[in-house]
Amino acid sequence: MKRFFVFSFVLLDELVSITFNVFENFVRVDKRNIALIKIASVRDVVLGAPLRLILKQLALRTLPPDEGQLIALVHRPMESFFLIPQPDKVTVLYPMRFKDSIDTALAISFFQEFVEARRTPGLNSAPLCTWSPTPPLELKEAPAEALEANAGFVTFVIFPRHVEGRKLDRTAWSLSTFHAYVSYHVKCSEGFMHTRMRRRVESLIEALDRAKPDMETKKVLRGNSFKRLSIKDARGNSKS
């Protein structure tokens, strides 16, 4: 990364501030996408380091020092997800919360479909995934404020086969960015529905406009006057 940027670290009590100075002449045009990806991944790489360490212990099948204990990893301000390391597996639990009620409803539907998709024959080797609207028993020791999740709780069970070789980095990245992954798909679904609704409204407006008579037809109808004829007048007109 230092090929593209000059960066510095500043310690503020228990917080760490990282500043990047990006020089345009240091980044080639064909390398800018790579540079942006590296900048965007810094937060997840730093915050995901403890998760990667625990998964590496699972891959090596070593006995973790904090076996069976509930470990909280902060991934967003005032929000955490939890790990329970064991010699043969690692349980990862996510309390999911959203500020908007529409996002919450879409997320719940997404989780239910996510769990159902795991049961398809082609995904038998994927990590076990469950969703529950109430806190699972594994979180009985978690603080009460961490269990305030309006979109339920998602649980993944990671086995050694999921972190073998190159799978380790991919699994650690997927778990550390899971909340961002869900938020992205929720926002995409909401935007897709809004687009469909706008198109539907536009088509209805076009149909209503086509149903209206033309202005020239209106003028002709307004310029003509109709006189009601009696039966005698009608017979006289027919004879003439």
Image (spheres, rainbow, N blue to C red):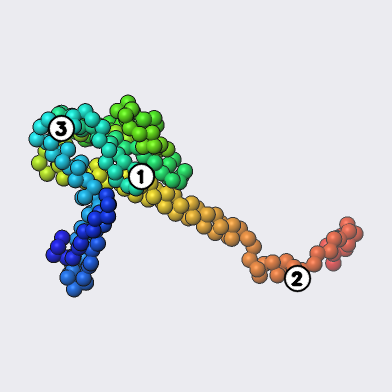
Image location of residue 140, percent across then percent down: 33, 27
Q: Which amino acid does label 2 sit on?
A: Gly
Identify the mark nearer the N-term, 2 or 3: 3
Identify the mark nearer the N-term, 1 or 2: 1
Q: Residue at x 21, y 72 (%)?
A: 24
Q: Which residue is drawn at 25% across and 44% down?
A: 176
Q: Which amino acid does label 1 sit on?
A: Met
- Alpha carbon of mark 1 to alpha carbon of mark 2: how far? 73 Å
Looking at the figure, which quarter contains the N terminus? bottom left
Identify the mark nearer the N-term, 1 or 3: 3
Q: Which residue is drawn at 32% across and 35% down?
A: 154
Residue matched to label 1: 78
Camera-nearest residue between 148 and 160: 148
Q: Is 219 left or right of 62, judged from the image as shown? A: right
Residue 216's place in the image compared with 149, above or below, is: below
- Alpha carbon of mark 1 to alpha carbon of mark 3: how far? 26 Å
Image location of residue 66, percent across then percent down: 18, 32
Discs 1/2, front: 1
Tag 2: Cα neighbours inside 10 Å, few (<14), some, or many (≥20)? few
Q: Do the residues labelled 2 and 3 touch (CB within 8 Å)?
A: no
Instruction: Report the disc number at residue 117.
Output: none
Q: Identify the element where label 1 is drawn.
A: loop
The quarter of the picture where residue 56 lies is top left
Image location of residue 121, percent across then percent down: 23, 32
Residue matched to label 3: 65
Q: Which amino acid does label 3 sit on?
A: Pro
Q: Identify the element where label 2 is drawn.
A: helix
Residue matched to label 2: 223
